[in-house]
Image (cartoon, helix red, strand yellow):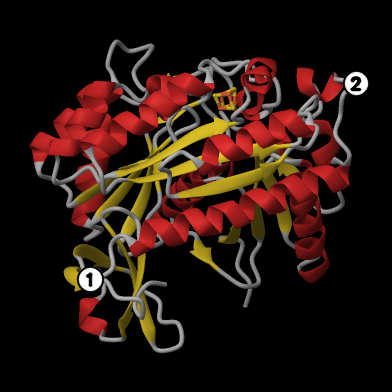
Amino acid sequence: MKTERTFSIHTLGCKLNYSESSHISRKLLENGFSISYDPSYIIVNSCAVTGAAEKKGRNLVSKLHREHPAAKVIVIGCYSELDAQKVSEWEGVYRTYGTENKIHLVNHLLGESEPEVPEFFSAFSSLSRTRSFLKIQDGCDYHCTYCTVAKARGNSRSDTIENVMANIKEIHEMGIKEVNLTGVNVGDFGHQTGETLFELLSVIEQSNLIERVRISSIEPNLLTDEIIQLVSQSKTIMPHFHIPLQSGSNKVLQGMKRRYNREFFASKVQHIKQILPDACIAVDVITGFPGESDIDFEDTYTFIEHLPISYLHVFTYSKRPGTPASESKEQIQESIKRSRTNRLLALSDMKKETFYNQFINTKRAVLVEEGVHQNYLYGFTDNYIKVQINNQKELINQIIEVTLTEQNLA
Ligand code: SF4
């Protein structure tokens, strides 16, 4: 039978959203709520990074409302921050919260008064037994001309090192072995509090509290040489970098108002590879930014082709309302954008294969994850190579040495 204190939560978008959804779930569960397939409250943590993400949110809310007409739907997150009015008019929506006050929905559901908006609320995910996404920073003070995330999430702000360490301790006590440090602009950590990401990583390294740490996407201009040096000497911070390039054309980078040029980016990647030859380097790229000519795209393609990176995350540019790039008259045709995306995806596959092949017949440490697919377990090496392992339940959440072969690369 349905009770008033039941909920379900659905998350779209980035790791920050996942960490926050998990945090909200934990708070509700600690306060007498339970998760149900036929809940009284349905929480949707929305995303606005692309037009497609917004559409997905709208469709999800409509589907959930159709399936559970009596449930009260609460929409939180970036889309409801950017367009609360529109979201609140969707059928079935009972309430909306933005990004900074989303945590207040817990107070609301508990019948408490909602506090002042906090500067920063910390959160971490605990849905997986092996890996947690820990939010250490939020918002962004950069103004990249295509980006709506900075607008949706507000100014840059961070947790303190002390609180991050308290969260890591709690994560460790749950038996989780890997922490992914997450934020909108992680490299900006501590900017307002006088601390730095390097200091945080040094404290984590010295604490021996957790087996593995990964740094989520970090701006190239904020990935300092001292951080790279620290990673090269660390047993805890994994040799795995995720760096947004966005374009290999200086003209396009300028139009995006990015804070580096292709020469700087190349020297950063070379420096990592010099000190950490085995490091995995994942790179974000956007295709079809307004004004990106065929020549600009070819510049990007050849630039990436010659860089020792491991694989790409390719995003097709989409107009975000209210951003300077959306006003440009030089929008690129959809079919051209699509074909550029496909070419970069094929290049990414080749890069990944080359990267993986270097390690065949070498031994790497693999953290075995839960979840069995076709009788295999999966895990990632320190340098983020996905490996399949014969299903032996006792290996889950263990870090084991695996010799990589053509057969076990996933
Ligand atoms: S660095 Fe640029 S793209 Fe990234 S969140 Fe900030 S404004 Fe957006």
What is the crowding at mark 2: few (fewer than 14 residues within 10 Å), some, or many (at least 20)?
Answer: few
Q: Which residue is mark 2?
A: 329
**Which structural element holds mark 1?**
loop
Picture quadrant where residue 2 is located: bottom right
- Residue 60 vertical placement versus 194 (above, below): below
In-image side of 379 versus 104 (left or right): left
Q: In this rendering, does residue 150 appear at all?
A: yes
Name the residue located 40 percent from the left edge and 89 percent from the top edge: 375
Name the residue located 45 percent from the left edge and 82 percent from the top edge: 373
Q: Which quarter of the rendering shows the N terminus?
A: bottom right
**Which structural element holds mark 2?**
loop
Picture quadrant where residue 166 is located: top left
- Residue 218 vertical placement versus 251 (above, below): below
Q: Which residue is mark 1?
A: 361
Picture quadrant where residue 401 is located: bottom left
Name the residue located 15 percent from the left edge and 30 percent from the top edge: 203
Dot 1 or dot 2, earlier in sequence: 2
Q: Foreground: 380 or 30?
A: 380
- Residue type at tag 2: Lys
Q: Foreground: 43 or 350?
A: 350
Spatial CA distance of label 1 from label 2 is 52 Å
Q: Position of residue 74 (x, y in %)?
A: 69, 48
Q: Position of residue 313 (x, y in %)?
A: 56, 47
Numbered badge on residue 305: none
In-image side of 131 versus 323 (left or right): left
Q: Position of residue 246 (x, y in %)?
A: 60, 32
- Residue type at tag 1: Asn
